[in-house]
Amino acid sequence: MNNSVIKDPTFPMRHAQVTELKNTAKIADLAKDADVLITRNGETIAYLVNPEHYEALISAWNELRVKVSQIVLTSYEQQHGGLQRLDEAIAATQRGEWATPEEEAEVFDD
């Protein structure tokens, strides 16, 4: 894993990957140029957010979620001619009614 700031256009803020949390001087140096530090230990991933940029990170994440949701809903609407079946499926789930595999296939075209 590289210990430098990663240029990833899909991530909303500058971030750096850190292989170990033992070298605090190295981490502090990386943190100067990053809004988020990402460390990985086996399957565990930790995100250490620079407190000065926390609100901006949350805002950027929320904006990204809204954009992705709009894309997914637009695509679903184009494929299915509307959102009515999806709305019905969501309402049924909120009432605690779970769809059968056949009903899922009808809504999601599986």
Image (cartoon, helix red, strand yellow):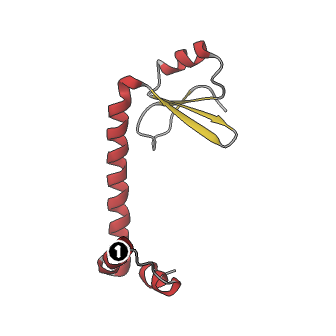
Q: Residue 71: x, y in percent?
A: 35, 61
The quadrant holding residue 24 is top right
For mark 1, give the secondary structure.
loop
Front-most of 48 and 7?
48
Question: Which of the pair 51/34 is nearer the observer?
Answer: 51
Q: Is residue 23 left or right of residue 106?
A: right
Instruction: Name which residue type carries label 1.
Output: Arg
The residue at which mark 1 appears reads as: 95
Which residue is at a point 33% across and 54% down the rendered structure image?
67
In the rendered image, residue 14, in percent from the top left (x then y), is placed at 45, 31
Across and down, in percent, residue 40 comes to: 63, 36
Residue 52 quadrant = top left
Query: Across the whole image, how many numbered discs are drawn on residues?
Result: 1
Is residue 4 toward the left or the right of residue 13 in the image? right
Vertical relation: 81 (above or below) 63: below
Which residue ends up furthest to the right in the rendered image? 42
Q: Quadrant of the N terminus?
A: top right
Label 1: few (<14), some or many (≥20) within 10 Å?
A: few
Rendered position, 20 above or below 101? above
| Residue at image point 59% right, 12% down | 25
Q: Residue at x 59, y 39 (%)?
A: 45
Which residue is drawn at the image coordinates 50% and 39% (left, top)?
8
Up the image or down, 102 lies above or below 62; here it is: below
Residue 78: give x, y in percent of width and height. 34, 75
